[in-house]
Amino acid sequence: MSAPARLVVLISGNGSNLQAILDACRSGALPAKVAAVISNKSDAYGLERARLAGLPALALPKRKELDRLDYDCMLAEQVAAFQPDWIVLAGWLRLLSLEFLGRFPGRVVNIHPALPGAFPGLEAIERAFAAWQRGVIDHSGVMIHLVPDEGVDSGPVLAQERIDFLPGDTLESFAQRMHTLEHRLYVETLHHLVTQVQSCER
Ligand code: GRF
């Protein structure tokens, strides 16, 4: 049997998607190993989650004297040192340049809390909720996609699932359903990715 796929997870904050991935790896539901967690925010709670799981947890904030490409180059070096099969963006809130992406072609995966083409960028859940309140939309969803270039929350779609707004929804109730879906869909999609690649290697 081949070794479990190695994931490096990039985060910027709470890390609930990271936690879902860690739990799935530990239970065996996801045949993968998180090799490291890296955050561009030193105070990201996700770093604590990684430490609690006994994993390398690196804070790599962008220092002012580094320009964007130098930072991405340094980040790529740090990520590559963990020899990842997949780089998993889980609430990573920095746009990655080709300086980084070019080092890992076809191996960077992102989650966006909206459907393809909808609400790219920050606060997609809040913006979708506001659009529903204005009567513009009646559903939203979650997508998982590859990150081939510097497009914001765009790229080949690996999975997507719709969520309908419900009568009486509040931002909190909607966000809760979205996060529950995110956690399941990310684990399922990563499972598909890592087992597909493993079976091709046999
Ligand atoms: C998620 O909604 C993710 O889709 C978005 O940022 C949020 C991160 O949440 N990109 P968490 O840090 O995984 O809890």
Image (spheres, rainbow, N blue to C red):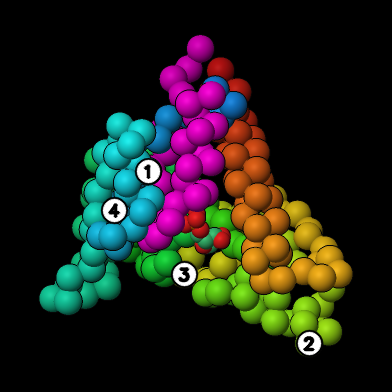
Residue 104 lies, in percent from the top left, at: 40, 49
- For marks 2 and 1, the one nearer the N-term is 1
The residue to which callout 3 is attached is 150
Residue 187 appears in the figure:
yes
Q: Is residue 78 above or below residue 192?
A: below
Mark 2 and mark 1 residues within 8 Å of each other at the beta carbon: no
Looking at the rendered structure, the secondary structure element under dot 4 is helix
Residue 103 appears in the figure:
no
| Label number found at residue 76 | 4
Looking at the rendered structure, the secondary structure element under dot 3 is loop
Residue farthest left in this picture: 65
Looking at the rendered structure, the secondary structure element under dot 2 is loop
Magenta region:
1-27
Q: Quadrant of residue 99?
A: bottom left
Question: Residue flagged by tag 2: what amino acid is it?
Answer: Arg
Q: Residues within 10 Å of mark 3 (few under 14, many from 20)?
A: few
- For marks 2 and 3, the one nearer the N-term is 2
The residue that appears at 29% across and 53% down in the rendered structure is 76
Q: Residues within 10 Å of mark 4 (few under 14, many from 20)?
A: some
Mark 1 and mark 3 residues within 8 Å of each other at the beta carbon: no
Question: Residue flagged by tag 1: what amino acid is it?
Answer: Arg
The residue to which callout 1 is attached is 49
Q: Tell me if residue 8 is in the magenta stretch.
A: yes
- For marks 4 and 1, the one nearer the N-term is 1
The residue to which callout 2 is attached is 134
